[in-house]
Each structure stands twice: as C-alpha cells, then as structure tokens.
Image (tube, rainbow, N blue to C red):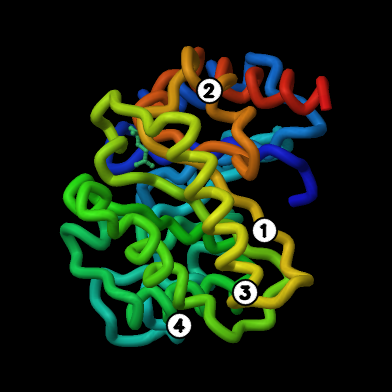
Amino acid sequence: MQQKKWILGNWKMNGRLAQNADVLSGLLKQPIASENVFVGIAVPSVYIGAAAAQVSGSRCVIGAQDVSRFAADGAYTGEINAAMLQDAGVQFVLIGHSERRQYFGENNAILTEKWQNSLNADLVPVLCVGETLVEREAGLAESVVAEQLSILDGRELSHVVAAYEPVWAIGTGKVANHEQIGAMHAFIHERILSLCGNNVKIRTLYGGSVNESNAADILTVPHVDGALVGGASLKADSFAAIIQAAAKIEAQN
Ligand code: PGA
C-alpha cells in the first residue's frame, strides 16, 4: 500500500449480489490503473467473498466496514473477527465510522480493541473521526477529534490511516469548505505525530459528500491524502471519476 492518494468507497448497508457485480465490473472497465492511487471499497460483510473474487488481479481491493472487538474464534454469535476478514480477502477495515459510534455505541474502549485486532491480522485499520454540527458550532470540533484520536496514544506505529468525516457532511450534500478541511487535516496530522512519534507515516482521507464534481477541489487541500466516499461509490462512473481526479492531481505533482 505505497501509493499516494487513497480513494476508498464505503457501500454501507447497500447493494445485492447482482447489483454489486455490476458496479464492480463497471469500475474495472474504467481506467483506474494509476500507480499513484490506491483504490478500495468497503462492502457489506456478507458480500466480501464475492467482491474479493471479482476484483482479484485488479488494482481495486476490498475492505470491511467493521470488525469484531473479539480477536479469537469462539462463542460470539453474529461476530466476524479480523482473522476471518483477512481470510476472506479483506485488506482494510473502517474503524469507528460515525454511524457505528451513533447507532452501535462504539466508544474508544471498543475501538481500541478493533484497531488492535485489525493490525494483528495484517489489515489496515482506517480510523474514522469527525464532529457533529452541534459540536462544531460549540467550538468543540478539535477537542472531539482529539478525543477520538486518543486511541492511538503511545503506540509505536509506522503508519496511521485516518479519515476525517464531519458528521454534518455525511450523506447531506454539505461539504466542509477548504478552510475547515485544511485546518482539521493539519490538526489531525500534528495530533497523530504527537501521539505516535515523528516517524509515523500519516494518511488522512476526507469524507462527507465527496462526489465527481467536488473531488478534484477537495483533494488539492493540503494534508488531504485521499477520500472516503459513501454514496458516490455506489455508482461505477462516479467512483471512477473520483479516482481519475486523484490520479490527475498526482500526475501533476
Ligand atoms: P457520503 O458518506 O459520501 O455518502 O457522504 C461518506 C461516509 O460516510 O463514509
């Protein structure tokens, strides 16, 4: 996973076998083969096997949207551990997406376990952080994000992948402006350096209503190392256009 910009899709709880196969085959027909862009899609867990088989040999990898807090196999009905995800062909896992925090009560204690389990199974954890509108308006955006990043405290990590997704920008069509994105990405960068030491390689993706019209603009903001794309990753053409926007920016660098 050496490439520069990362464009990750998050299908959330959408899709069916046939529809997923259509999206992936549409995507694989497009020119996504840029050296400089790492492409992945986090699919619903029940579809991981089919999706991983379909993208095998391409430049697109498959991720999971969640992982169990329990590492070992055993009596945890309904759970899927990191080793199973790895076995099924997953390469990265979203950790602490705001929808998991909101609807499933995921807190830092749980997310610390999920983060560590993913690393132990050689999966790349993508730590999702972001404030709500109420928190932003109360001037708490940075302190909320700092608290979410605190699960990294004191860890000797060589790489950290984070995704800044302001909750008020997810699925709403509202995108944070350049200043808001730039300031928060710079803050996240500094914060991770102070938590993990100066040798850590940091990649921070922006997420929240990224689409083919705004991607090029967002991806040029300093410290924006890619995008986490929800709705627009469900359409092959839109997702491919975002990947191409990233490739074009990298080609100019
Ligand atoms: P969105 O979702 O692109 O539909 O806003 C992003 C996300 O939640 O990861």
Whether residue 51 is visible, yes or no, is no
Instruction: Using the rendered view, name the quadrant where residue 159 is placed.
Output: bottom right
Name the foreground residue: 133 vs 246: 133
Task: State whether label 3 is within 8 Å of ligand 1.
Answer: no
**Residue 228 vertical placement versus 140 (above, below):** above
Residue in the picture at 59% in, 77% down: 195
| Residue 186 x/y as whole percent | 58, 51
**Would residue 174 be found to the left or right of residue 200 on screen?**
left
Q: Amino acid at mark 1?
A: Ile
Res 213 visible: yes
Image depth: mark 1 or mark 3 in front: 3
Q: Which residue is mark 4?
A: 71
Indicate the quadrant containing the C terminus: top left, top right, bottom left or bottom right.
Answer: top right
**Residue that protrudes farthest toward the front in the picture:** 139
Mark 3, other Cα within 10 Å: few <14 / some 14–19 / many ≥20: some
Which element carries disc 2, helix, strand or loop?
helix
Q: CA gap, disc 1 to disc 4? A: 25 Å
For label 2, the residue is 215
Q: Earlier in the sequence, mark 1 or mark 4?
A: 4
User: Can you give x and y, in whole percent of width and height, for residue 208 in the image?
Assistant: 37, 36
- Return the residue at label 3: 194
Judging by the rendered image, the residue that carries numbered circle 1 is 202
Residue type, label 4: Ala
From mark 3 to mark 2, how far is it between C-alphas? Answer: 29 Å
Question: For disc 1, does the CB lie below 8 Å from ligand 1?
Answer: no
Crowding near the residue tagged with mark 1, few <14, some 14–19, many ≥20 C-alpha atoms within 10 Å: many
